[in-house]
Amino acid sequence: EVQLVESGGGLVQPGGSLRLSCAASGFSFSSYWMHWVRQAPGKGLVWVSRISSDGSITSYADSVKGRFTISRDNAKKTLYLQMNSLRAEDTAAYYCVREHDFWRIDYWGQGTLVTVSS
Amino acid sequence: QSVLTQPPSVSGAPGQRVTISCTGSSSNIGAGYDVHWYQQPPGTAPKVLIYGNTNRPSGVPDRFSGSKSGTSASLAITGLQAEDEADYYCQSYDSSLSGGVFGGGTKLTVL
């Protein structure tokens, strides 16, 4: 059974940093591209970042480019999102998702909540 | 403002049919990129409902169907049931943004 379990969310002050993790199990993690998608409270889904199966290719939404860094450790079957210079508008549930093929998501984690507030 | 446009809400009585539209542009749906649909019941994570414009994953009832034409796509739900109450999102790829794009979401209410 495919499982994606996010962790690392919490309350952080504006300008602060946080690192999210996503532990994957039940599939060959190193074979799949992975993404982070976020959802502000009461709002819609927004794509954040994507990483290739070997970690060599990354892309970001304009709203987080230069502040967030996606990475992965295939040996540990873990996806990461390093978030720096956090802003109030980054407050959201962050979902780790698996890409089946070209931008088609087939599995979602349960999400981890990030709150940016003083 | 989402790149893909969906109606904020739709409603229908049990047993009825509803459709949810998803309108894009020449850099996403109109460029031939696939549209995928996700269902998000209240307080839960999204799950895949339709992929590749028209395909249902195993376990999704055939009451749900997808279509695509030009710069738009649609999700149809027939035989509405109370358990269908959820938010529904369309998603595609946008070549101008070089990234994934979602619709703003549509809240389905079963009357």
Image: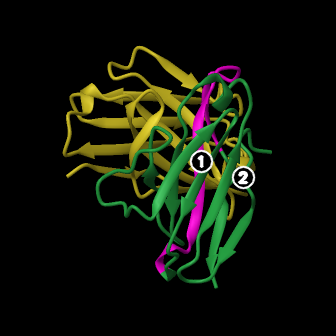
Q: Is residue B55 above or below residue A74?
A: below
The kind of secondary structure element at disc 1 is strand
The kind of secondary structure element at disc 2 is loop
Magenta residues span B83-102
Q: Is residue B62 above or below residue A14?
A: below
Which sits in the foreground, A26 or A74? A26
Q: Chain of mark 2?
A: B
Q: Amino acid at mark 1?
A: Cys
Q: Residue at x 25, y 49 (%)?
A: A2
Give the image location of residue B100, x and y in percent. 59, 33
Q: Which chain is green?
A: B
Query: Tag 1: Cα neighbours inside 10 Å, few (<14), some, or many (≥20)?
Result: many
Q: Residue at x 64, y 85 (%)?
A: B111
Colour assigned to chain A in the rendering is: yellow
Q: Are marks 1 and 2 in contact (CB under 8 Å)?
A: yes
Q: Is residue B97 magenta?
A: yes
Q: CA distance from mark 1 to mark 2?
A: 8 Å
Q: Amino acid at mark 2?
A: Gln
Which residue bears the numbered disc 2? Answer: B6
Compared across the picture, whether A58 is left or right of A42 comes to: left
**Is tag 1's residue or tag 2's residue first in the polypeptide sequence?**
2
Compared across the picture, whether A25 is left or right of B22 comes to: left
Which sits in the foreground, B97 or B39? B39
Which residue bears the numbered disc 1? Answer: B90
Q: Quadrant of residue A118?
A: bottom right
Compared across the picture, whether A31 is left or right of A10 comes to: left
Q: Is residue B9 above or below residue B25?
A: below
Q: Residue at x 29, y 54 (%)?
A: B58
